[in-house]
Every structure is written in structure tokens, then in C-alpha cells.
Image (cartoon, rainbow, N blue to C red):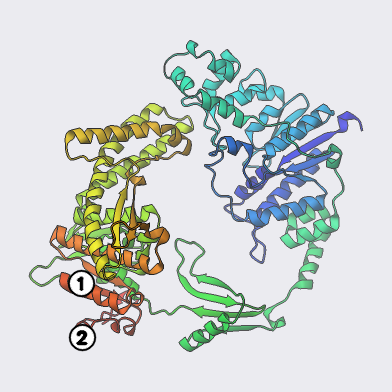
Amino acid sequence: MDNALKKLFLLDGMVLIFRSHFAFTRNPRVTAKGRNVSIPYGFTSTLIRILEKENPTHIAVVFDTTGPTKRHEIFPAYKGQRDKAPEELDTAIPDVDRILDAFNIPAYRLSGFEADDLIGTIAKRADREGFETYIVTTDKDFAQLVTDNTYLYRLSTRNDTEEIMGISQIQEKWDVQRVDQVIDILSLWGDTSDNIPGVTGIGEKTAQKLLAQFDTVENLLQSTDQLKGKQRENLENEAEIALLSKQLATIDRNVPLDFNLEDMRRQSPNMENLKQIFIELEFSQLGKRVFGDLFAKQQDASKSEFLQTIDDIETNYQLVETAEQRLNLIQLLSQQSAFCFDCETTSLDKKQAELVGLAFSFAPQTGFYVPFPTDSDWFYLKAGIGALSANLSLEDKVQFPVANWQQQVVRECFPVGNELIIEASHEVEGQKQFRLNGDLLSKLSEWVGQFRVVLFSPESLILVKGAPGDRRRFLDQLICQINPLYLSQLQRYQSSLRQRNELLKQIRNHRQSVDLLEPWDELLVEDGILITKVRTQMLDLLHQSAKNHHAQLTQSTEVLNLRYCPSLQEVETTDNSEKEVAVNHFRQRLQKSRSTDLIYGNTSVGPHRDEFKLFIQEPDSNSIQREVKLYGSQGQQRTTSLALKLGEVELIHSQTGNVPVVLLDDVLSELDDIRSQLLFALFQDFGAQLFITATREEEWVAHLPTNFNQHYRLITIDNGQIVA
């Protein structure tokens, strides 16, 4: 074949897949059966346009693999900032592979290497064998591969246009003398899309000026004595990062890929297979484009051939509404080796959805639907009390108006003569409003601590089993209920932290100077030292209280210990000299972690990374301590969380002189008789007022001690209103 006719198109498969995904994000293409086919549709549309417009003699598609590459081995954070791949890729990639197979277009993958490297290797051989090669992508990195016979066929991310770039276009766009200097620019500038760090303070224009003077990164690093100020300092301090960035940005053109250019010769598609795929994926417009107007008739005929309705199929679908029916279903499911279930909700939005029922099936055309009981208005009471207390973990769950009855509920919480009227309202479309004795409060900090509530619920286990952030949040909320001024300090620290993290990202992307970090570091240090001190002191108090309650609950067979684990070393701050040591240590840790923080765009040290851990051991002081989260049984974890909550009640009482209102949210059924008796005895000693929430009265009355079960008031909630 004449060299002029050897026209090879190499398509960057993953780029085309993600381009298709984002093109249809707002208006996805979905089949009649609800299947999202946006990615294979967009990919196929681009492929057909290239085949029709460019008429290549040879064509291939190259894909990344899911595993790590050699770049990850030398720099684990490589591409680490990218979001998780969309779920639809799991089904879309096999569809794309089937489409390529039907077009008789080869696809290449190689474990441990990126598509960039495979394309570079194929293009290098094609260049040597006289091909005119076009690399189809949106990725700017491929500019380094352009030669006299290899071109960048750069697709637009917004429409179906493209830009074909040769050597002169690359030189003009990148302002370089040679194409290979693109690598050096990326080494200095960095590449946020691949998380290549680059050098602090050097952007695209500065990199171009430096390379115009020094030609390569290596020459530049050997000539830093010709530079001045911060630029020289950054290049000398980050020389290794610059060389690492160059290694990451360089496309490997010698990959051990087994391929033959002749296998990429364009062939006629397998029209029958392609037609069936187009019918299955409902590619009506593309089908007409490839097969003509007859495709629509063939598509309709194919649909009618396989179309069935519920009238054509024998089914066994049952509604399970009563307790007896539910029991029968449980017994039936227990006899199956496997079954599937589906959650029925009010919305596809996970933030708005409410669970309304469960569907089960274990055989074709067989199904059981279990609707949830509607008598769950007790949640309004729980949410209202939570909102009134400004208990943040519960307040976040309030998604409906509760102002109609909150004032009435709160009046019940205090004896006549010492009445405190507090109101909280939250309209779905409006803002929360808080009033104290009728006066509107302007800030949340004025509200916190006015009405103290301790919540016991099955979710309290998260204090033991959850992440460090769950325990930090519990400790911060406890401190806020005792010392409301702590909230302002915590909010100020969190605001400074957000600002610093945003600045880290801007510096990483070369949009801000690293010098701007210093004032934010000082704000973090100032508030962070005090937050750590207050938390440590509060945990010491909680430790002793929870330890005592744990001993009662376990009849002294185990000992509970709480340990604060700061991300900084513990330093006492009782006098000015020791406080200065702590401040300097925090400041030094921020400086030391700055390079890592810039890579990840997050602050890695400070009280927002602190933790407290829970340990149990036998009464013998020499016995081994075991962390409850990792080694505790379910019973030990439940007892530990209960001891923490009891410690919370006692601390609020001892530190403020007021007994908090206690909300038992569906927990009595979780406790045995011994723990129930101990729990109520402690509440009786405190004189605490209890709110017990349950869907039915009989579910909790049986758990009350004898001296309680005749002295309670029943509050019935119906559709958010108190009715009895």
C-alpha cells in the first residue's frame, strides 16, 4: 500500500467514554426498560463521525486498565484526587467492547500501563513505518507525541468539533521551541487532572519563560543561582518534585505491547451483530445513519416479537400487610437458599428518600411487597425535642415543620414557677428560628445550652463502632451543652480550616502564593490549642463518670478506659511557657506537613484529626486492654455506648446544675431486664424527665420498672399534631 494512503486513527477509549458520560449528565439517554445507554451512544456517535468524515485506512481503540501503573508505584497520589468512576461504567464498558467487536475494530489494554503509553508505543512504530497517525483525545498531554507524521486530533469537550494539531500548532500553542518541551512545562506547571504536583508558584507562563532561557528542567535546576527570591527558593527546595513530575508527565513509548499494525486495518462491520446491538440499546438515530430508513421498521418488528405484558405471563405477586402474613413470609424466606430484596422509597434522591416498603423475590414471576406501617408519627416528637435542644446530630434530621406543637411539649419539661419557654421552628423552604421566652435569638450560639437533651437510641452504637469523626462530634456536642461559648471557638476553627483547605487547592493549581498560608496557620494554631485543651479536660471527666456506670452495668467484671488520641503530641497548656511549647509544636507540624497538604488539598494535622478511643480490660490492673471497636463483642459495644450516654447525663447535671431531658428512642427493646432496671434507677436518682418514643405503647410499657409503669403520661402524635 502507498504510504500516503496509510492513515491510522488511535482513539483514547477512556477519554471518549468520560466525554460521553459528561455530555449526557443533565439529559441521559435511557431505554424503555430504564437502562442508561448514554456512554455507549456518545462513544458510538463519535466513532461513526470519525469513520465517515476522516475515512481512516487503519483504526484502533486503546483503554486504561483498573489496576495501578508504574506511575502509582513512584507516586501513590497520582490521579488520587479524581472522583470515583460513575457506576454506569460497569455496564457501559462491556457495551462499548461489543460495539467495537461488531465494527471489527481492535481494542488494546495492558495491565500496569496507561492508554497514553500504549498509544505512544503504537504511534512510534507507525511513524517509523510511514503511517500518518492521528491521536483522538481531549487530553493535552499527548502534545508531546506530535511529529512530522503524527498529529493530535483534539476533540472539543463541548461539541462535535475538533482541532488537528501538528508541530507548528503545538509550538505556537505551548510557546515552545520543540515539542518535547511540553513535558518540561508540565513538570514545572503541574497537571491538576492527573495530580502531578509541579513546582509551587510556577504557572504556565512562568514555565514557558524559564524554558526559553534554560531549555530543559534539568538545565534549570542546575542554574538556580541565576534566579532570585522565592522562585529560586521553591526550585531548590522542590527540585526532586520537579524531576518526579517530569517522570510522571513523560509518556512511555516503549511499552511491551504485542501488536501488529496490519491488525488495525479497517474492515467492514458485522452488520447483523451491529444491528442487534443498536436495536437492544435503542440507537434509533444512529441505526438510521448506518442502516438507512429500514432500520426503524426492523426495530419495531424486533420489539413486537419479544414484547410481553403481564397478561401474557403467569405471576404470583402478593401484598403482605398483616403481622400473620409477615410471619409467614419470614418462614418462607428462611426456607430459601437465596433471595433478593429491593427497598421501595419515596424518591430516587438519597438525601430526600424515605423508606416505605420492601419487596422480596426468590423465583421468576414471584414477588412479595411488604409496606411499612404508617403509625410512625412518634418521629415528630423525637425530632421536635431534638430541634429544641440544638442537639446537632438530631437536628440535622428534622426535615418537616414542627413548630405547631413544640412549645406545648417544652412547657411540660419544667416545673411551674421556674418556667422557661423555648420554641424552635423550621419550615421546609425557610430557615430555622429560635425563641427564648418569646424573644427571637439571632445566633445559634445564643440557643445552645438553653435546653439540654441526651438522646439514647440504637444509633448510639456509632460512638463505639463509628469513625473518629463520630466520637469527635459527640464530645464537641457534650462540651457545647455544658459550655455554649465553646461553639463559637469551634465554628471559628472550622471556618479557618475550610479557608486553608481551599487555599491549598488554589496554591496546588498555581492560582495563589504559598505565603498566604501563614495567617491561616496562625488562626488554626490559636483556636486549635484551646480546643484540644478543652476536649482533653472534658474527656477526663467523662472517663471517670462513664467508667463508674460501666462498672455498674457489668457488675464490675470489666473496666472501661477512655483515651484521647490527638494528631499532635499532648502538651499541657496550664501556664504561658507550656502553652508556647504547644503553639510552636503545632506551628512546626503544619510547616512539616505542608508539602503533603498541598498534594491532597487538605490539612492533615490539628484537632479536626483527633480521636478518642475506648478500651476494656479485666479488673486486674495488669490485664491487657482491648479496644472495644476492634475486639469487643456486640454486647460489650452496646454496654460501652450506654455507659458513655449515662456519663453524658451525669456530666451535664454536675457541671451545670440542671438535669437534662432524656430521650429514649426505641432502645428499651435492646436492653435486658438487668440493664433496664439499672437505667431507670439512675434516672430516678438524677430526677431526670424521660421521653420514651415507640410506635406502640405495649412495646415499651412492659420494660418499665414497677414504680414507673403507673406514672407516665401518654402523648399521641398523629400527622405531626398532638392528639392525646
Q: Quadrant of the N terminus?
A: top right
Front: mark 2 or 1 = 1
In x, y percent, where is residue 406? 24, 69
**Residue type at tag 2:** Gln
Q: Is residue 443 visible?
A: no
- Dot 1: what SS? helix
Query: Residue 103: x, y in percent?
Result: 81, 50
Measuring 38% from the left and 53% from the top, which residue is drawn there?
A: 468
- Which residue is disc 2 drawn over? 710
Q: Position of residue 475 (x, y in %)?
A: 28, 54
Lower position in the chain sequence, tag 2 or tag 1: 1
Disc 1: which residue:
683
Q: Amino acid at mark 1?
A: Phe
Residue furthest toward the right? 1
Residue 602 location (% of width, % of height) = 42, 40
What residue is rendered at 75% in x and 33% in y?
121
Which of the 4 image quadrants contains residue 182?
top right
Q: What residue is at 66 percent from the left and 47 percent from the top? A: 17
Mark 2 → mark 1, Cα distance in angstroms: 16 Å
